[in-house]
Amino acid sequence: MTITHCKTDGDKATLGFVVANAAQGSEKETLVFLSSDGVYCAVPEEMAKINEGGPFAPLKDLVEKFIKAGGKIYVCTPCMKKRGITENDLIEGATPAGGAALVEWLSNGSPSVAY
């Protein structure tokens, strides 16, 4: 799954993690690749600002649930660099990665959904 929004569209970020949690809860190995504005989903101060309201949980809670359930989060390294985000700025459980990591994941036949 790729998520390209956070600050620009909290609804898309929230829905992306709702679906990611559903996939992880269905015992499907799940990877979320954050790119563009979506990288902010892995920055604690920014994800804490996103709360789209009922029936959805706050983004922070959704991200934490996903990681606790064993979900993987890769964060686009060039997108981080463009926004002045360092690895130290990311939540625990988020891994900086280039596009090649996403391509490798997809090449194993994994489906992809984008938000």
Image (spheres, rainbow, N blue to C red):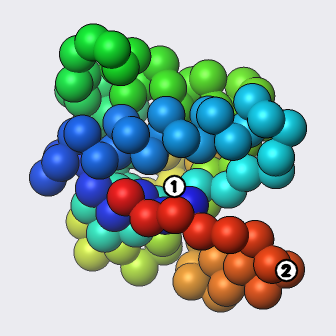
Crowd tier of the residue under label 2, counting other residues whose Cα lies within 10 Å: few below 14, some 14–19, many 20 or above: few
- Residue shown at 57% from the left, 80% from the top: 98
Task: Find residue 20 and report its image quarter.
Answer: top right
Does any portion of residue 23 appear in the rendered image?
yes
- Which one is earlier in the sequence, the residue at label 2 or at label 1? 1
- Do the residues bearing badges 2 and 1 touch, measured as CB atoms within 8 Å? no
Where residue 93 appears, as percent x and y from the top left, is: 66, 41
Q: Which residue is mark 1?
A: 87
Q: Nearer the viewer, mark 2 or mark 1?
A: 2
Where residue 108 appears, as percent x and y from the top left, is: 85, 80
- For residue 21, the mark is none
Task: Find residue 78 and report its image quarter.
Answer: bottom left
- For residue 108, the mark is 2
- Residue shown at 79% from the left, 35% from the top: 26
The quarter in which the C terminus is drawn is bottom left
How far separated are the C-alphas under marks 2 and 1?
27 Å
In the rendered structure, the answer to whether residue 87 lies left or right of residue 111 reads left
Q: Amino acid at mark 2?
A: Asn
